Amino acid sequence: MTTLTRPEQKAPAAPRRRRGVTQQQRPLWLLTPGGVLLVLVVLIPLALAVYLSLLDLDQYTLRRWIEAPFIGLGNYVESLDSGLLHSIWISVSFSVLSTAVTVPIGIAAALVTQNAYRGRGLVRAAFLIPYVLPSFVVASVWRTMLQPDGVVNAWLAKAGVDGGLWLSGSKSYWTLVLVEIWAAWPFIYLMALAALQSVDHEVHEASAVDGATWWPKLRRVILPYLRGPVLLACLLATLNHINNFTLPFVLFGAPAPDDVNVMPMLVYVTSFQGLRFGLSAAMAVVSLILIAIPLYVYLRAVRLDVHEEGGRK
Amino acid sequence: MSASAEATRLLPRPMLVTLTVLLCAMVLVPVSYIVLASLNSDVGVASGEFWPSSFSLESYTKIWTTADLSTGIVNSLIVCACTAVASALLGTTTAYVLVRYSFLGRLTILRGLVGLQSIPGTLMLLPVFVLFSSAGNYLGLTVIGTRWGLFVAYLTFALPFSTWVMVTYLRGLPRELEEAARTEGASTLVILWRIVFPLSLPAIVVSGIFAFLLGWNDVLFASVLTRPETHTAAVALQIFGTSQEGGALPVYSQMMAAALICAMPVVLLYLTFQRYLVGGLTAGGVK
């Protein structure tokens, strides 16, 4: 895993000297402040979360949680009857749908800002706005616009359409997807733009010499360059969608309408409004298992180490 | 247009123009709505006006008395600044060892740093909440509702993230200077303080800014771990928003002014450090 394509001839001299340094005086004690803090604030809570999911923990046992009764997998069984499967379905479909729509938008935005023209700086800055705005601001603004008497319904009424309710009922799911798309597409745009800029100029010139028109050139020459980075961005974007709590919470409030009861909302409401901490810990652990699959693929694909250079494009 | 620029053009001109206009409209219509609505009157916004029938800056003065926004902003600034400094400094030291030295478990730590950024916030909040609320019982400390509690809670996300940002930066830093200093007999601490810190200052600032933004943008932790007097700006705005419905007259114009005020520090940070931050976004790969 560590040395994949290091040049053979350089191997004897350089690494030995380096190993000499690293073996003799590795200042590993420098890891202590950051490491101890990481263990304290990350690892212990994570382990505790798993343990809590096995306890019958509610508002009465919370203050003395160590003595709370141990009920094994009871919380997991109960969570199946508490809307967990429904929430998993909502979360997964919402995340996949949002990612699927943001990809073409993001790539299109990268394509139109690839070439320099007057005012491109402004367009690029504008494209970043939805991403830079804090989620709670975005959600507050859309919540205002989508009020029954708000500006969206006023415009729809002018077009002769009755907008109806956006923030409750069955349409709320589509509201959530739309706002998430509005806020999240610049991430794909940024990743696609970075990939686009790494395409060599010769590639462009070669296809120009070949006389390729724009669509075959785009499909057969340029888009293959984008595939890897955009797929990686998709994984990450989907993970971010699944974990997004702020948007549904600020848009709809807690408890959320049934159609937008995504995993983070379910866990939040179960714990901090239902005060069933053990049960919600079980739900949170399930949501961790849910994201483990895309996360595993992502961790395999991302470049972790200095020594992996050349091993992965 | 020169021939070489012509060669790199990817879309025919009419399509390019149409797409650019569409994308800009998609972004700018809601954004200009925020600005226009904040300049409108509360009645005008509530009746669905896009273009205000009368302009005034009244909302920007009224909002400070309507909602407790100033407390929220001060709290946010204090907690997020502490988070930023702590995680950037500790992150740099940790990242330096992770990049420069090999040891058992190093790859696991690196993988963990990336993986932790995708852990659901709710999963981390639960145990933190339980620990904090029992601290009063077992240790005699009040943690929930204090800024300290929030600071520790934000470190759970900011610290791995800052460390990872520094790892991606430091591995691109040539090690010749450090090795030269080492042959001169400099100790690791001196090297770190005199060479690594100054050379990676832009990256340290970026990782600090990201840590700051993680805190500033958070609603989940702050909504559970704060009391009214320790509310952050995000929670103040969220509560203000929910309190509008069912009331006599919703003050949506003031709400949009508040939203803009809350977004302002973030926008300013981005404008100032745009070049570095966008690079960091794609390197760290996380918002």
Image (spheres, coloured by chain):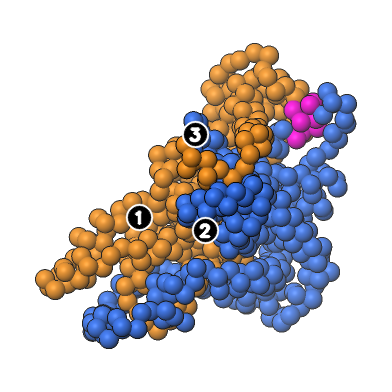
Left or right placement of residue B36 versus residue A201 in this view: right
Residue type of the residue flagged with mark 2: Gly
User: Which residue does the numbered mark 2 point to in the structure image?
Assistant: B285
Q: Quadrant of residue A147?
A: top right
Q: Secondary structure at mark 2?
A: loop
Q: Reading the chain from its start, which is encountered first: label 2 or label 1? A: 1
Q: Quadrant of residue A92?
A: bottom right
Residue extending furthest toward the front:
A210
Q: Secondary structure at mark 1?
A: helix
Left or right placement of residue B121 versus residue A179 in this view: left
Q: Are marks 2 and 1 on the same chain?
A: yes
Q: Which residues are magenta?
A: A146-155
User: Which residue does the numbered mark 3 point to in the structure image?
Assistant: B1
Task: Specify the subunit that label 2 lies on.
Answer: B
* Marks 2, 1: nearer the viewer: 2
Q: Are marks 1 and 3 on the same chain?
A: yes
Q: In the rendered structure, does residue B185 fall within the stretch colored magenta?
A: no
Task: Specify the subunit that label 1 lies on.
Answer: B
Q: Is residue B202 above or below residue A19?
A: above
**Colour representing chain A:** blue
* Marks 3, 2: nearer the viewer: 3
